[in-house]
Image: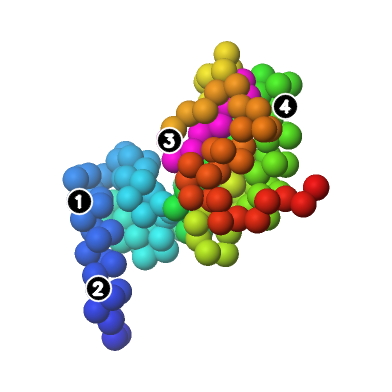
Amino acid sequence: MHIDSREMEQQQNYQRAIQAYPGEPRYLLAAMQDLQKEFNYLPRLGLKILAQHMGLPVSKVYATASFYKAFSLVPKGKVVFRVCDGTACHIKGSETLVDQLQKYLKIPPGETTQDGAFSLETVNCLGACALAPVMVVNGRVYGKVTPGSIEKIISEYGGQAYEQPTE
Ligand code: FES
């Protein structure tokens, strides 16, 4: 089988990301978290290498990756907007925040812009209900977010190039 140099390099990157973990199934979740943290999603080849390393069938590793909402099997944007849609945030208007973000980015929750710059997601309670509605952008928490502040937050992450919504 022919493996080109790019694939070999990727293979080495994935191996490096999981090498700290012993080849035992109980480390599977932790290793998957590291893989995702480093590559922003779980690449197919990375999961295959992980399965071999842990001595598990690839199907088991895929099943685990699909089960947890925190894992993604598709590449995500460089900037990920996560809007909490737990009960407290929902009551405080998280839906409007999602609407605003959709209008700016022109993608529904769960999608990534074509240029790979932004992803939009809704998530369950982030454990910061006192700050509802809450949004997390690349790990930074924004509390008591108002629809009017969305534009400013997007521009902090280089989104000013996106067209403003017409309505
Ligand atoms: S419901 Fe949003 S942080 Fe708890």
Residue stretch rendered in magenta on the structure: 132-139
Q: As drawn, is 140 to the left or to the right of 108?
A: left
Label number found at residue 19: 1
Residue at position x 52%, y 28% in the image? 142
Q: Tag 2: residue type?
A: Met
In space, the residues marked 1 and 4 are separated at their CA atoms by 43 Å
In space, the residues marked 4 and 2 are separated at their CA atoms by 47 Å
Label number found at residue 117: none
Residue ID for mark 2: 8
* N-term-proximal mark, 4 vs 3: 4
Residue ID for mark 3: 139
- Main secondary structure type of the part rendered in magenta: loop
* N-term-proximal mark, 4 vs 2: 2
Q: Nearer the viewer, mark 4 or mark 2?
A: 4
Q: Nearer the viewer, mark 1 or mark 3?
A: 3
In space, the residues marked 1 and 3 are separated at their CA atoms by 25 Å
In space, the residues marked 4 and 3 are separated at their CA atoms by 21 Å
Q: As drawn, is 115 to the left or to the right of 150?
A: left
Label number found at residue 93: 4
